Amino acid sequence: MTSWNLWHGCRKISEGCRHCYVYRQDALWAQDASLIRKTAAFDLPVRRDRTGRYRIAPGETIHTCFTSDFFIDEADAWREEAWSMIRRRRDCTFVIFTKRIGRVAACLPEDWGDGWPHVVLCCTCENQKRADERLPVYLDLPLRRREVICAPLLGPIDLQRYLASGGIDLVTCGGESGNDARVCDYAWVTALQEQCKSAGVAFSFHQTGARLRKEGRIYRIRREFQHVQAHKAGIDLLPPAEYPSLYTEAELFEQESFRQ
């Protein structure tokens, strides 16, 4: 897995953004996380080593733009070049998360057709309101594969009518991280799993979050154990290696050692 952070900075647009990890980390460096700027890694996928080979090897999964949103309007001037690099690296898989699903159709490249097979565009929705707002738009987009990320999971979500459409391939969910994390109820997680099981859709509980409520008791879970504890629940409905997008933006950010 490789991370490619084209631009950095974002604007909060919904409930899931309240305790944004980007704002939290940038505050430690006295940076304004609402300022969108290109990063030094902008051309990372097409960089070559001294032998002329791409620095990112063929076959890699590249998680894209995890400290911003690929479809944020401040990046409109840079996106065409970004698509050009993605087009060139058809030997890799690019995973893109977005909350701005309403902007996607207008921002796709002219040769997108019914979707590029090496691009996985994932829609995030943290509660029922955002699921009902974003998923009808998402399901109308020309995509080869659709993956819904319910994270941070802030309440129960009923996806049954969207899953019944047959257009969703994977649902993942997880709680919120950080000291101010809101509670994720395990009953919300298992309800999503049951919906996916009934619809024959793959499912993954990728992390517990910092505060997990189970049978009325709230557990505080340290960051390094949140993936492990979620995996121990044993409720996934897929072999994880089959899907490239089982990390959320927050998890990718926390795995990175570099600073902007």
Image (cartoon, rainbow, N blue to C red):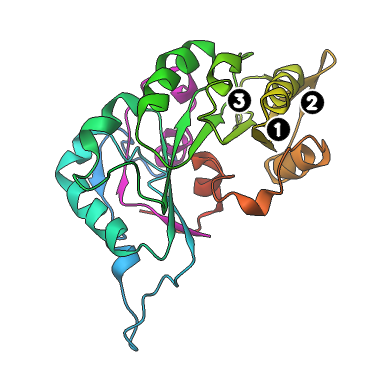
SS at mark 1 in the image: loop
Give the residue displayed 67% in from the left and 37% down from the top. 204
User: Given the current orientation, which residue lies at the most extreme left position?
Assistant: 77
In front: mark 1 or mark 3? 1
What's the amino acid at mark 1?
Answer: Thr
Give the vertical position of 37 relative to 62 (above or below). above
Is residue 104 rendered to the left or right of residue 155?
A: left
Give the residue displayed 82% in from the left and 41% down from the top. 232
Residue 239 drawn at (x, y percent): 71, 49
Give the vertical position of 127 relative to 175 (above or below). above
Q: CA distance from mark 1 to mark 2?
A: 10 Å
Residue 182 drawn at (x, y percent): 62, 20
**Quarter-of-image position of residue 141:** top left
SS at mark 3 in the image: loop
Give the residue displayed 33% in from the left and 34% down from the top. 10
First in sequence: mark 1 vs mark 3: 3
The boundaries of the magenta stretch are 1-27
Is residue 20 on the magenta stretch? yes
In front: mark 1 or mark 2? 1
Give the vertical position of 250 relative to 4 (above or below). above
* Mark identifier at residue 208: 1
Is residue 242 rendered to the left or right of residue 9?
A: right
Find disc 2 in the rendering and name its residue: 219
